[in-house]
Image (cartoon, rainbow, N blue to C red):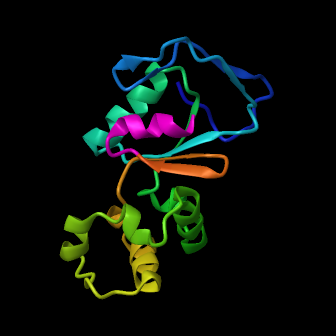
Amino acid sequence: MFRSSASCKRKIVLSDFHVGRTPLAAPLQKTYSADMTYILLHNPSCSTSRNGLALLEEKGVEVEVRKYTNKSEALTEAELRDITSKMGADSPRAFLREKDAKKFELADTATDDDVYAAMVDNPRLIQRPIGINGNKAALGRPIEQLLDIV
């Protein structure tokens, strides 16, 4: 299930939450404020991104889906820099699709500023899916990593 960007005032409770395939020793009981929206940067044409969304829904995580490849939902350079910071990374290369970098002729020697600019111009350069929750972000490779920030 996913919700629009409109804020919801109810609380979300996750229980019997499993990490990967191994259940935790005891059920995890955490309450999350609805003010902390889980945003999934999603490309519906990518099977890994679809599987990541399905995993989050299966675990009962309410997700705001952002189809960042659509012009109307495109990411800005400032948002990409924020994602880098929330991932705890030093460079946007942490979520750069290397095989597409070659296709779009992004040089291995490109600066971080060049990489950000290329990602804004060509959102297919952005690895997916990416989950964002509060001040944390995670690349869903493998998709179970999306659960690390719930």
Q: Residue at x 71, y 39 (%)?
A: 36
Left or right position of 84 against 95: right
Quadrant in which residue 120 is drawn: bottom left
Q: Position of residue 123 (x, y in %)?
A: 39, 65
Q: Position of residue 82 (x, y in %)?
A: 60, 65
Q: Position of residue 41 (x, y in %)?
A: 47, 49
Left or right position of 45 against 53: left
Q: Residue at x 47, y 24 (%)?
A: 57
Q: Main secondary structure of the magenta part?
A: helix
Left or right position of 86 against 93: right
Q: Quadrant of the C terminus?
A: top right
Q: Position of residue 23 (x, y in %)?
A: 42, 15
Q: Is residue 149 magenta?
A: yes
Q: Residue at x 25, y 83 (%)?
A: 108
Q: Which residues are magenta?
A: 140-150
Residue 148 shows up from this direction: yes
Is residue 20 depicted above or below 119 in this figure?
A: above
Front-most of 142 and 37?
Answer: 142
Q: Is residue 111 magenta?
A: no
Query: How many callouts does the rendering have?
Result: 0
Is residue 21 depicted above or below 64 in this figure?
A: above
Residue found at the far right of this picture: 9
Front-most of 89 and 24?
Answer: 24
Left or right position of 15 against 30: left
Quadrant in which residue 5 is drawn: top right
